[in-house]
Amino acid sequence: MGGRHPPPSFQDIVRVSGLAQRLSIFPLPGAVLFPGLQLPLHIFEPRYRSLVGDALVRDRQIAMIQPQQPIDGAPLFSIGTIGRIGEIEAMEDGRYNLILEGQSRFKLLREIDVVTAFRQVEGEPIDDDEDETLSYAQRGGFESEARKFADRQGYTVDWDSVERLDDHSLINGVSQIAPFDPASKQALLEAENLSARCELLVQLMQFFGRSDGGEEIMTLQ
């Protein structure tokens, strides 16, 4: 009748009690943020300037999630990352330069119907195991494949510094900066755990490493 709403389900009650969060999102194609890493952003569109302004007066949180197509209002992928605004530079014309710090992955539950210029969703944070480590064989195999990939691509890498990185920083860092297509980056983000992400990353380096300077860039899309 009229404006009455049906009573909440048990699932809705559980979500409200703590797991689910209302998240303001920046659905930027090709931009994937991993927990523990940083993503520099230049914010110039009015709706995303509004997004940043809103986040600054609330919890400084912005969630990054890729759209399934590079068009406005496209459906979203199922996994994204909650970020927190760290360093920020506000310009006189309303633009921002900021560093978004990855906090945790989240699972998309639903998009919320809002009147704000920016999109908002209900998301459930994913509790990743921060203590998970790679086996010596996994770590060694990854570093070996990474060296071959870097050589084929012509990258200069400080391997001494790489060897000092912990497993999470190494695997998530390479996943974020590697020159893969958006679908591959999304697959890495959605990997169940660190070990699965490492295995997929090795496969992607092998796949993308087949191309040379005279070929078109291959993608998995």
Image: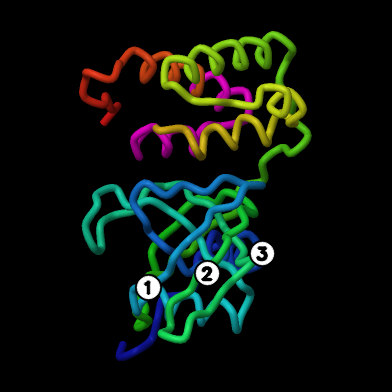
**Quadrant of the image occupied by residue 86:** bottom right
Identify the element where label 3 is drawn.
Answer: helix
Please give the name of the residue rendered at 34% of the width and 79% of the height, measured from the top-left corner. Answer: 46
Nearest the viewer among 9 and 161 is 161
- Verify whether residue 206 appears in magenta: no
Q: How far from the left and from the top, in percent, is residue 141?
A: 62, 10
Please give the name of the residue rendered at 60% of the width and 16% of the height, measured from the top-left corner. Answer: 142
Q: Which amino acid type is shown beneath numbered disc 2? A: Arg
In the shown orientation, is residue 96 left or right of residue 194?
left
Q: Which amino acid type is shown beneath numbered disc 3? A: Gly
Q: Which amino acid type is shown beneath numbered disc 1? A: Phe
Q: How far from the left and from the top, in percent, is residue 194?
A: 63, 29
Q: Which residue is mark 1?
A: 44
Q: Which residue is mark 2?
A: 22
- Front label number (2 vs 3): 2
Which of disc 1 and disc 3 is earlier in sequence?
3
Asked whether disc 2 touches disc 3, contact meaning CB atoms under 8 Å apart, the reply is: no
Please give the name of the residue rendered at 57% of the width and 49% of the height, measured from the top-left corner. Answer: 105
Quarter the C terminus occupies = top left
Q: Which residue is mark 3?
A: 18
Please give the name of the residue rendered at 68% of the width and 34% of the height, measured from the top-left corner. Answer: 168
Identify the element where label 1 is drawn.
Answer: loop
